[in-house]
Amino acid sequence: MIHSHILYHVVPQIFTFTAVQHQLIMKLNPFLLLITVSALVFISCHNTDTSNKQPNNTVDKMEQRVNELAPVKLTTDLTRLTDSEKKMIPLLIDAAHIMDTLFAYQAYGNLDSLLNATTNPNTKKFIEINYGPWDRLRNDSPFVEGIGPKPSGANFYPTDMSKVEFEEANLKDKTGLYNFIRRDEAGKLYTFPFHEKFKQPLERAAAKLREAAAMAEDPGLKNYLTLRADALLHDEYQKSDFAWLDMKNNGLDIVIGPIETYEDQLFGYKASYEGYVLIKDKDWSSRLAKYAAFLPELQDSLPVTSEYKTEKPGSDGDLNAYDVIYYAGSANAGGKTIAINLPNDEEVQLKKGTRRLQLKNAMQAKFDKIMVPIANVLITPDQRQNVKFDAFFANTMFHEVAHGLGIKNTINGKGTVRKALKEYASALEEGKADILGLFMVEQLLAKGEMKGELKDYYTTFIAGIFRSVRFGAGDAHGIANMIRFNYFQEHHAFTRQSDGTYKVNYENMKSAIDSLSNLILTLQGNGDYEAVAKLVADKGKIGDQLQKDLDRLGEVNIPVDVIFEQGVQVLGLQ
């Protein structure tokens, strides 16, 4: 689960003050900014020409952007829950909802000031969807006039701070996950812990978790909620991570706290707040449980030399299927996650493994509303029958399982892969999980541990690239998708037909999967920052022909992604 190396598609602007200047103006004279922003015309597409901009059209164009996202109600069968579990759900949702405000600050700053200065309801809604004025599904391009490119470090670092200044600064825990980098009055950098910045909202979230813990009937869930509440207040999460992996029989679950580092595209060090409230599908989960046990064997069979697979993946973690009933914070920003692999703590992973959560209802919605329509446009007609939900589910699931394969620490003393590869670590890790997930499917099919045709998994995988790459190449997942797409194209794993559809070359897929797996695992093990930077520069971008094909999907109104109608009212819990 798990960015500047980004090519921004920035629109020509009449007003070019930066996000920092915008915040300074707000601090000094909010009324001035209100007048200025209210008078500005909101842009629509990343290729908008200012000479042709029509103020009367911008409202419609912002509405069009909102309408590119298909609404999905997050519901589930609550009859499988006990009365106590039903009473816990509103408390867990309340705790998760607090993460929205914390993440908005991490991503942008004072979002309320921007919302209050925005008069158009569609623009306001789009700001809320994106947790800021940058379109996350268009390479973070700004859609509010007068807002410049998104800072690579979001709001985690001073925007006037250079990489060299940071690297030379003698700061305690400067690469830590759970602090901001700020300047004092003399201009000197210092660290500011999350739990101090957000003390009051985190106390409210912790209180909700403790109240839910008091109702929990499952001892494992009760222990986890209690420890997670403590962790929020001190930024010490390892004990609660272990407790989360230890609970096995819970019907409810919540993932909450600062977790993923995608938002920090400057270094990839700082974690963002997010929340998921989940209900376990115990029947589906029991069918998936056996696959985690294959990790050590699959690690040994990876297509790379022995020094890059000496680590033994923990196999105590498990696979589970869930219906997700609430997304918040980073989880709810941009392309919506349909599977999770946690914890990210390398020490926990090596000792206990991870838990892989398949978000079945969200996955089904994306398959029905997006994947099938995409296949009907871009996959050659005689292969469309090979695009199947079971293959989509398995490819997604084994992506998360594959995070446990490979290597977490470099082989040459450069420390963890995450720290050695800095802002590129997340993109390469997501690329590794994608390709090794498909490698796992091949291996398990050959062993007779899975059913189905390999053609279904390959074809669904290629169709899935078209779905994911529409999010742009502006984050770790988008970069990983483009590297894989361009690599596969160069190795003839698929070909573009004269009718504009794509045909999977099944014979070439196996060799392309093996060679790309070898490349990524080697780069990770070597901690080769320069080589990964070159790979991203060469292959982590959308070509002109692919962009034209993706544009065709918009022309026939295929949604880019989904947005959720969620909460206690949607669930019928008043």
Image (spheres, rainbow, N blue to C red):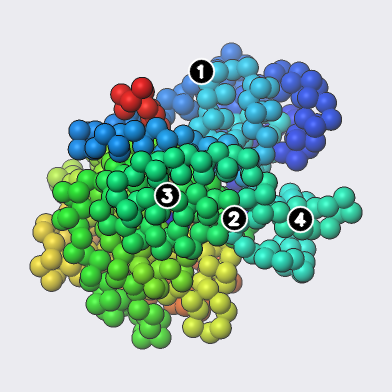
- Numbered disc 3: secondary structure: helix
Tell which residue pokes out farthest to the right in this image. 186
Left or right, 364 with respect to 530, comes to: left
The disc labelled 4 sits on which kind of residue?
A: Met
The disc labelled 2 sits on which kind of residue?
A: His
Tell me the CA gap for discs 1 and 4: 38 Å
Q: Is residue 411 above or below residue 393?
A: below
Residue located beneath label 1 in the image: 60
Q: Are marks 2 and 1 in contact (CB under 8 Å)?
A: no
- Numbered disc 4: secondary structure: loop
Task: Name the foreground residue: 338 vs 385.
Answer: 338
Residue 275: image quadrant is: top left
Tell me the CA gap for discs 3 and 2: 15 Å
Task: Name the foreground residue: 19 vs 212.
Answer: 212
Residue located beneath label 3 in the image: 225
Residue located beneath label 4 in the image: 161
Q: Position of residue 19 (x, y in %)?
A: 72, 38
Q: Earlier in the sequence, mark 3 or mark 2?
A: 3
Tell me the CA gap for discs 1 and 3: 45 Å
Residue 135: image quadrant is: top right
Q: Position of residue 162 (x, y in %)?
A: 75, 59
The disc labelled 3 sits on which kind of residue?
A: Leu
Q: Are marks 3 and 4 in contact (CB under 8 Å)?
A: no
Q: Is residue 79 above or below residue 247?
A: above
Q: Earlier in the sequence, mark 3 or mark 4?
A: 4
| Neighbours of disc 4 within 10 Å: few (<14), some (14-19), many (20+) | some
Q: Position of residue 495 (x, y in %)?
A: 29, 55
The residue that appears at 35% across and 61% down in the rendered structure is 245
- Numbered disc 2: secondary structure: helix
Q: Earlier in the sequence, mark 1 or mark 4?
A: 1
The disc labelled 1 sits on which kind of residue?
A: Asp
